[in-house]
Amino acid sequence: MTVETFSSVTDLAARLEAGEFSSEELTRHYLKRAHSFTGLNAFITIDEDRALSEAEAADALRARGEATRVTGIPIAHKDVFCTKGLLTTCGSKMLGNWVAPYDATVVARLGSAGVVTLGKANMDEFAMGSSNENSHFGAVANPWETDRVPGGSSGGSASLVAAGLAPAATGTDTGGSIRQPAAFCGLTGMKPTYGRVSRYGMVAFASSLDQGGLFAHTAADIALLLPYMAGFDPKDSTSSPTTDDWLDACRREPLAPAEGLTIGLPKEYFDGLGVPAAAVDAARRALESAGFRFREVSLPHTAAAIPAYYIIAGAEASTNLSRYDGVRFGHRCGNPESLDDLYERSRSEGFGTEVKRRILTGTYALSVGYFDAYYLKAQKIRRLIQEDFLAAFADVDLLLTPTTPNVAFEHGAHADDPVTMYQQDIFTVPASLSGLPAVSVPCGFHEGLPLGMQLIGPHFAEQNVLRTAEAYQRLTGWHLEHPEGF
Ligand code: GLN
């Protein structure tokens, strides 16, 4: 059996279907690779036994003629998703030895379609970060240059797909945690519309923003996997009952490229930006040659997105994380002297610095006397940002922007400067605040490191977003470039 290092899910699915190899053989191939490149620190847990028994079950499903289009494909899950009987740490000491009693809907749905879980990917603690340096389990390396960060918070998922340790991985995106690491690692990464993918069993960070999604090499691969994890879930009160024939179609046929859409270029995303803007401009020319039309648009409240996001996300995190009190589950301090002592020391010992910073700022923003000045104001800004997008989508089908203001930075570069780190999310946070679907697609290189561009669509327009990305990937070969040494 020969499997190319950076095989796409689409290729592997076709070869499984043709009987060229079994899921068990394919799973062994990826397990071997995962064990060979532990230096990246991309996995927190690799569960060989579970992966192989799931692979056997996938092969049996195929033998019975019950295979889906993705049966037998091995992937990794971000360690934010609950996995029954398998460690779910969320990158935190707080959950350092927590084994979930149930599977997240995402894990359960992909599993019942025959997708194999190789293990759990490293991540920033509780998904807070833009560099994967906030993990209790150590920083993750970017396969393109190992002294660079892979981005965050889904840095492990991005690193392991970029290094060919799995053909795809799940991630979550609250303010950019799929799109930014996808850009830094040369991958295609999608955050679907808020409500498209169930949050049940996804450890909560900021519940009005959190959304599960995928990393892969191509838009076609994402369109192949997404229908098996998306869709209404009665166990998530914000899950959308919207049904979508297109998602059903993706279970049957390959993604067709889009044609002739009108794409807006929001001027606020390009002002003063050098290299990433030039790469996006080259992408515009490529798409223009294929019949896409472009128009400049304005999203005037863009600059207010970062402060609003960090107030809202922190506020929601401060309430979500109050459940970690050392009583019911998670880290518990030794020999508590009183209930207050138990709470205080369990939380001080269990959470890392960035998580504590978010809890403190979030609690402050919600406190009596400051609520109106911070939380309420941030909510008003969120509304204005949403209205900017809705106004733009009256004139254009999609928006095209850079994903990040720069390429992957060196480990430690912003470690002591949270505000500079937060600025990394400047182009990804607005779509998050507005609940919009967005994909990051490789669009060039700067000094040997990948650059990404972002396509943002109206709510539930995943179809146009992915089909435009597919059209672009037929025109260009950036997504086919891979790091050396793997
Ligand atoms: N970097 C952002 C933050 O730290 C986004 C994180 C995310 O999307 N999970 O909040």
Image: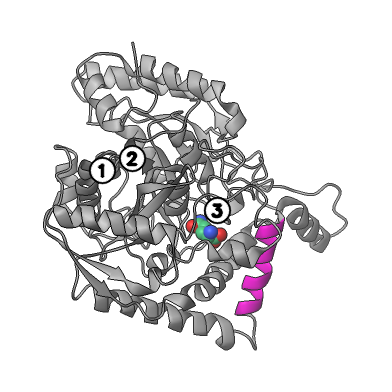
Residues at badges 3 and 2 in contact (C-beta under 8 Å)? no
The picture quadrant where one finds residue 340 is bottom right
Magenta region includes residue 434: no
Secondary structure of the residue carrying tag 2 is helix
* Residue 476, disc: 1
Q: Look at label 3 and name its amino acid.
A: Ala
Residue 363 part of the magenta segment:
yes
Q: Residues within 10 Å of mark 2 (few under 14, many from 20)?
A: many
Q: Nearer the viewer, residue 236 or 396?
A: 396
Q: Residues within 10 Å of mark 3 (few under 14, many from 20)?
A: many
- Which of discs 1 and 2 lies nearer the camera? The answer is 1
- Which mark lies nearer to you, 3 or 2? 2
Q: Which residue is mark 3?
A: 127
Disc 3 Cβ-to-ligand 1 distance below 8 Å: yes
Marks 1 and 3 sit apart, C-alpha to C-alpha, by 32 Å
Asked whether the residues under the numbered discs 1 and 2 touch, taking CB atoms below 8 Å apart as contact, a structural biologist would say yes
The image shows residue 82 at horizontal and vertical percentages of 50, 43
Magenta residues?
353-365
Quadrant containing the N terminus in the rendered view: top left
Q: Nearer the viewer, mark 1 or mark 3?
A: 1
Q: Residue at x 46, y 33 (%)?
A: 483
